[in-house]
């Protein structure tokens, strides 16, 4: 039979609150927190819910430690750092220890609040960093990749899946210093398709054909398919407008050259130049909204 907390000591509501960190309750929270964490990759505001759950579990773990006669510093530190999973492990390890309410629990509320705040900050900071590396959603900033991705579409961007940069990949770009007058400092300020890799020369002929050369072409003579070191990629699967003549432009080391699929939209490397690898927010892997364009890219 469960013992009620002694009357006249710690408030009953604190004692009951501490029960949230007692075996086996935290184990029911772990899968919920995991699902919320996965969901936050698709909808970033869910990360705030994850942080709240993480913070609440850390605070309850401290109160539970107080109810066991502990100071709660070690439990609070471990719970704030490890979240619901760590609280679940602690609850299993201490499941046979006696709990009782007393002066230590009553005076532990400020201590619990401090670790609650710490847990929330840690959870949000870790989640924010992890999501930026793994996957997150963003609003497409232009029609550069129309009709596949239109202005305002909700896209999934993954830096982890960027891997070795290759021609043809759809990528999102963060604002970077050299492009500040055009892109500003926004997160996901542009989208485009990689058409040029480091060491190449990129341009378009008067007829609108894109060419890629492994060495600087002769600017006096027109670039044709028989020019050594120059190729003309087949863009028919995705190109939606004729490319206006430009170049040749060298792609420096550590950068890539992006072009729009709709070449009428010049919000690409023709305007802001080659993009440093560090400014690539990630690969565009899917469109989530609107429903008519839900697709894996």
Image (tube, helix red, strand yellow):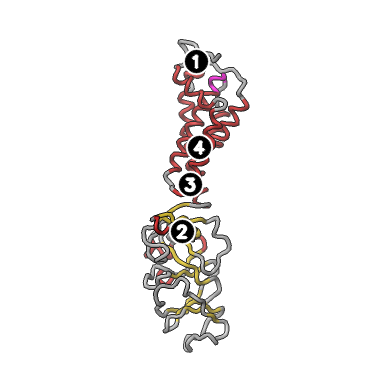
Q: Is residue 207 left or right of residue 29?
A: left
Q: In which quarter of the image is the N terminus?
A: top right
The residue sitting at 53% across, 23% down in the picture is 64
Q: Which residue lies furthest to the bottom in this view?
A: 221
What distance separates the C-alpha of mark 3 from that of mark 1? 38 Å
Residue extending furthest top? 7
Q: How far apart are marks 4 and 1 (CA)?
A: 33 Å
Q: Tell me the CA gap for discs 2 and 1.
A: 59 Å
Q: How far apart are marks 4 and 2 (CA)?
A: 27 Å
Badge 2 is on which residue? 295
N-terminal of the two: label 4 or label 1? 4
The mark nearer the N terminus, 2 or 3, is 3
**What secondary structure is found at the residue carrying circle 4?**
helix
Q: For the residue labelled by badge 1, is the local secondary structure a helix, a strand or a loop?
A: helix
Q: Which residue is identified by label 1?
A: 103
Q: Main secondary structure of the magenta part?
A: helix
The span picked out in magenta is 65-69
Count neighbours of disc 4 (C-alpha within 10 A) and say few if under 14, some if 14 to 19, many if 20 or more. some
Q: Which residue is drawn at 47% across and 52% down?
A: 136
């Amino acid at each position: 039979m469960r013992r009620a907390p002694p009357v006249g000591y710690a408030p009953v509501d604190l004692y009951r609150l501490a029960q949230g960190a007692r075996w086996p309750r935290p184990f029911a929270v772990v899968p919920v927190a995991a699902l919320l964490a996965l969901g936050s990759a698709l909808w970033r505001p869910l990360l705030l819910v994850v942080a709240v759950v993480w913070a609440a579990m850390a605070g309850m773990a401290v109160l539970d430690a107080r109810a066991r006669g502990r100071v709660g510093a070690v439990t609070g530190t471990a719970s704030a750092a490890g979240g619901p999973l760590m609280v679940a492990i602690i609850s299993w390890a201490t499941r046979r220890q006696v709990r009782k309410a007393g002066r230590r629990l009553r005076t532990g509320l400020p201590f619990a609040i401090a670790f609650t705040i710490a847990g929330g900050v840690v959870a949000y900071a870790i989640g924010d960093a992890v999501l930026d590396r793994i996957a997150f959603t963003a609003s497409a900033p232009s029609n550069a990749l129309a009709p596949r991705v239109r202005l305002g579409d909700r896209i999934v961007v993954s830096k982890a899946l960027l891997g070795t940069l290759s021609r043809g990949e759809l990528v999102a770009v963060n604002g970077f210093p050299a492009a500040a007058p055009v892109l500003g400092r926004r997160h996901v300020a542009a989208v485009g398709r990689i058409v040029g890799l480091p060491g190449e020369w990129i341009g378009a002929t008067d007829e609108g054909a894109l060419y890629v050369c492994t060495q600087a072409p002769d600017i006096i003579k027109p670039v044709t398919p028989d020019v050594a070191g120059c190729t003309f990629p087949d863009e028919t699967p995705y190109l939606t407008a004729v490319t206006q003549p430009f170049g040749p432009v060298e792609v420096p080391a550590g950068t890539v050259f992006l072009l729009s699929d709709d070449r009428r939209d010049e919000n690409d490397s023709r305007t802001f130049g080659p993009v440093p690898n560090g400014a690539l927010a990630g690969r565009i892997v899917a469109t989530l909204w609107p429903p008519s364009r839900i697709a894996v890219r």
